[in-house]
Amino acid sequence: MILVTGGAGFIGANFVLDWLAQHDEPVINLDKLTYAGNLETLASLQGDARHLFVHGDIGDAALVSRLLAEHKPRAVVNFAAESHVDRSIHGPEDFIQTNIVGTFHLLESVRAYWGSLPGDEREAFRFLHVSTDEVYGSLGKDDPAFTENHRYEPNSPYSASKAASDHLVRAYHHTYGLPVLTTNCSNNYGPYHFPEKLIPLMIVNALAGKALPVYGDGMQIRDWLYVKDHCSAIRRVLEAGRLGEVYNVGGWNEKPNIEIVNRVCALLDELRPRADGQPYAAQISYVTDRPGHDRRYAIDARKLEAELGWKPAETFETGIRKTVQWYLGNPDWVAHVQSGAYREWVGKQYSGSAA
Ligand code: NAD
Ligand code: TYD
């Protein structure tokens, strides 16, 4: 089996759902269930013996060591993190605690476990750390896209904390020989995305008749990857990545924010037109920019393609249409996130610390 951390969050939950749709290899899912953890996303796995959910913190060394010793996973995939840049600006401490201190404790627990494994299992073991392109900082308009050799220049407390965790993972390979792999991915979008991030926020605000807040001039550029393509990249790196290597993951979809917002509005105009016949773009409202806002991210994912043959399956057009359709088709999931009712799932569906 494998141990996934942060598997009740956006990408982790998509990963667990896809994994179990494709494999019978069981997953232990360790998640602290912060505001971003949503067990409702995993409702289809209720009663599925291949999924063991454990409510806990990656920084809890006693718990993690017990899970490793009891279940003997062949790999750990670390998604657990505080992930929202704006929250990191308002309150960086949780980011330092989970992304840096938590990852450190997780690495220590994993190192002790890995060291105790018999030879062939030790050989086969992998620790895959899921990271972000934001560690590389911001690009100028004409700069080449980030390669794996780009220097680290994080600009937000979020990206700085992720950069620190990447460095720890690297050091555990170089110093202790821990068999690590790191992926640095661009902005994801798709089903089960918490509506504090750009794309889901625009969809749910548009449908609720609220303003669509675009920071600054809306010309900041991100590279966008459909979440299921990120999950397939992680599976591929886990399967065949070279130990100690870093793989950039991206969608070859650089777009300014305002273009994304306009595309979401146009899809909603087509799929769920406003009752008054006006376009959703009329709800766009330019607001004060994010402090220290990175201007442009762009990912060069050629190493992953050349070495491991990975390519995204979705274009931005196909992925964004699926995403808008998913939000339109899942009003209960959205309503429970907005009302906070999703948090009651922990109490309702799971009684103890492990379920
Ligand atoms: P998310 O915020 O949706 O989910 C994070 C999950 O981690 C939540 O379920 C949360 O409860 C859990 N968690 C937080 N602290 C924990 C702790 N101390 N112990 C155990 N669980 C904890 O984030 P996401 O968007 O799914 O991102 C997952 C990972 O991918 C993160 O490491 C993030 O940095 C990275 N990443 C995200 C993106 C993106 O666009 N969302 C892009 C590249 C990389
Ligand atoms: P976000 O989804 O928070 O991801 P990240 O900051 O990790 O890239 O934001 C994506 C882009 O959208 C980023 O340039 C900030 C911008 N943005 C807005 O313009 N308005 C919003 O309400 C949000 C949440 C983000």
Image (cartoon, rainbow, N blue to C red):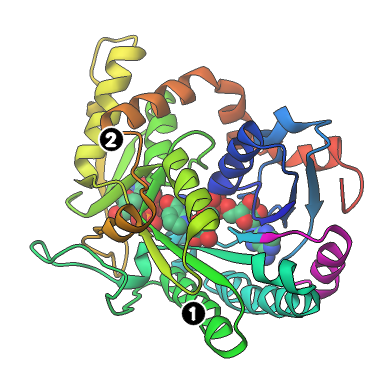
User: Along the horizontal axis of the image, is 9 left or right of 201?
Assistant: right
Q: Which mark is residue 316?
A: 2
Residue drawn at the location 65% of the way across and 49% of the way down: 7
Residue drawn at the location 43% of the way across and 37% of the way down: 200
Image spot of residue 77 (x, y percent): 61, 59
Image spot of residue 32 (x, y percent): 72, 57
Q: Which mark is residue 164?
A: 1
Label 1: which secondary element: helix
Query: Does residue 311 sit above or below 115 in this rendering?
Result: above
Label 2: which secondary element: helix
Looking at the rendered structure, the kind of residue marked 1 is: Ala
Residue drawn at the location 58% of the way across and 75% of the way down: 93
Query: Is 69 part of what is drawn in magenta?
Result: yes
Residue drawn at the location 66% of the way across and 39% of the way down: 340
Q: Residues within 10 Å of mark 1 (few under 14, many from 20)?
A: many
Residue 351 appears in which quarter of the rendering?
Answer: top right
Q: Is residue 207 visible?
A: yes
Query: Is 202 part of what is drawn in magenta?
Result: no
Q: Point out the stretch of residues depicted in magenta.
A: 59-75
Q: Is residue 83 visible?
A: no
SS majority, magenta: helix
Image spot of residue 152 (x, y percent): 33, 78
As drawn, which residue projects farthest toward the left?
142
- The front one of 269 and 145 is 145
Gap between marks 1 and 2 measured at Cα: 31 Å
